[in-house]
Amino acid sequence: MDFLAGRRLRRSRATAWSRAMVRETHLTPADLIWPLFVIEGKNDKTQIKTMPGVERLSVDLAVEAARQARDAGIPALALFPNTPDHLRSEGAEEAYNPDNLMCRALSAIKAAVPEIGLIADVALDEYSSDGQDGLVRDGVILNDETVEVMVRSALAQARAGADIIAPSDMMDGRVGAIRAVLDTEGFEDRQIMSYAAKYASCYYGPFREAVGSGARLKGDKRTYQMDYANSDEALREIAQDLEEGADSVMVKPGLPYLDIVRRAKDAFNVPIYAYQVSGEFAMIEFAAAAGALDRDAAILESLHAFKRAGCSGVLTYFALEVARKLG
Ligand code: PBG
């Protein structure tokens, strides 16, 4: 007995009221950002085979979803277009068409639900014919030429009502270039949330089905997305994006990369977000469907883990469901 010298850590865990008092992190609807996939059409939704329960929505239904998200206390949506095949091209020109699906979704939601923040993904894989995030010449992903297209895309999105521009492509210099054009065009008030530490990951598989880029993708994204073996490099990526003017940064994927979130939180005094990506969503859904784990418990445990690691918020396909439960 004496060897404990009175120190018993279990005392504070002994009852529910005491556990509540010493709880270090709290999840609220304000922590949850909801990604939405948009399609052409009216009153239409389509299923995603590898993401059970997640649907692609036509713009009118996305507006309805935005209302539900606002009512549940979700602060912001992240939009991703599934561009029809005939509008995709090698030059990804559709990315800066002011009337593209993304821009129409942004302006429709902004008009109907102005209280919710709109995060616009900027990358070329949603518009290009080859599924890469950048322009390709002779098998090489071009950096500066891609940034030029992204800048035009970001400007179109800002004009359509995007509150936060979120470059997810991992080209060098795109944050600074986007910041400069937003500022000269009168959009000084629009934020940039940079996908700063984005890894080349197998966990994006279901997302690529959702936006229709997976089947066309040749090769991989390892010349621009990061090597999963690296951690110091993530801090260099984040430092660079902050210097270029990012307001907040994202780590992606989420759960397997919480060490990066924690290092970033300790090193930089800025909001850090993480993306619980499509493959992480699928792991929970399919494991629960197979009876391997309790779905609701797994969702809550995973989301608290993000908070514990230091996230200011989480992009998660579970956002609406969880926000409603918490609210
Ligand atoms: C596109 C993009 C991807 C994701 C978000 N934006 C896929 C990719 O980089 O291949 C993945 C999100 C998810 O898996 O849920 N640049």
Image (cartoon, rainbow, N blue to C red):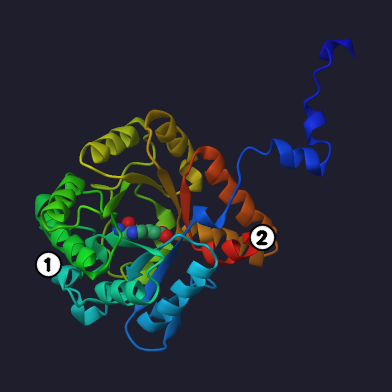
Tell me which residue sits at (24%, 47%) in the image: 224
Q: Quadrant of the N terminus?
A: top right
Tag 1 secondary structure? loop
Is label 2 in a helix, a strand or a loop? helix
Closer to the observer: label 1 or label 2?
2
Amino acid type, callout 1? Gly
Across and down, in percent, residue 30 comes to: 51, 55
Q: Is residue 204 left or right of residue 169?
A: right
Q: Is residue 273 left or right of residue 219?
A: right
Beta carbon of the mark 2 residue lies under 8 A of ligand 1: no
Q: How many neighbours does mark 1 have within 10 angstroms: few (below 14), some (14-19), or many (20 or more)?
A: some
Q: Residue 91 location in percent, x, y?
A: 12, 67
Q: Which mark is residue 325?
A: none
Q: Are marks 1 and 2 in contact (CB under 8 Å)?
A: no
| Front residue of 279 and 110 | 110
> Dot 2 corresponds to which residue?
296
Q: Quadrant of residue 127?
A: bottom left
Question: Residue 303: x and y, percent?
Answer: 57, 51
Q: Which image quarter holds the C terminus?
A: bottom right
Residue 91's tag is: 1
Percent coordinates x, y for residue 287 in the rendering: 62, 61
- Give the vertical position of 86 relative to 240 (above or below): below
Task: Tell which circle, 1 or 2, labels the residue nearer the N-terminal end.
Answer: 1
Say which residue appears at 43% left-offset and 37% top-offset: 260
Q: Is residue 135 visible?
A: no
**Would you place residue 124 above or below residue 265 in this image?**
below
Name the outermost residue toward the right: 1
Residue 33 quadrant: bottom left
Residue type indicated by callout 2: Asp
Task: Tell me which residue sits at (44%, 81%) in the image.
Answer: 46
